[in-house]
Image (cartoon, rainbow, N blue to C red):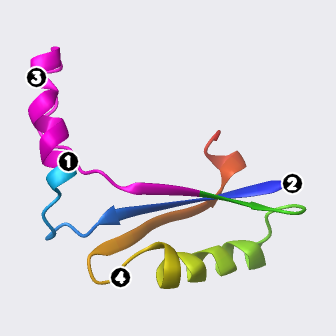
Amino acid sequence: MGRVVVEVMPKPEILDPQGKAVVGALPRLGFTQFTSVRQGKRFELEVDGDVTPEILAAAQQAAETMLSNPIIEDVVRVVDASEVGA
């Protein structure tokens, strides 16, 4: 059984209130080295069999049409999960 990882992030020009909340909380917890946070989404899509180029292309299309909102988000990565150690 294969797995595809899809990562979606808000476009750079879009305000990220969740990221702002996290970056505000980090210093209170002692993490002062971080100056910015952007929070995105990660999807893991399982398939029967191996992840092929055709499966990755279908996952890319699904990411662009259903898993993300193309007006405010970018699909930043579609990859075989075995390549990211997931």
What segment is highlighted magenta in the picture?
A: 19-43
Amino acid under disc 4: Pro
Look at the numbered disc 1 and give the secondary structure of its residue.
helix
| Mark-to-mark CA distance, 2 and 4 | 29 Å
Q: Nearer the viewer, residue 25 or 61?
A: 25
Q: State the residue lying farthest toward the top.
A: 30
Name the element at disc 4. loop
Magenta stretch: residue 23 in it?
Answer: yes
Disc 1/disc 4 C-alpha distance (Å) = 19 Å
Give the residue pinned by disc 3: 27
Q: Which mark is first along the chain, 3 or 2?
A: 2
Q: Earlier in the sequence, mark 3 or mark 4?
A: 3
Q: Is residue 68 above or below residue 20?
A: below
First in sequence: mark 2 or mark 4? 2
Task: Say which residue appears at 42% left-offset and 74% top-offset.
Answer: 68
Q: Position of residue 2 (x, y in %)?
A: 80, 56
State the separation of the CA atoms marked 2 and 3.
Answer: 41 Å
* Residue at image mark 1: 19
In this picture, residue 32 sits left or right of residue 41? left
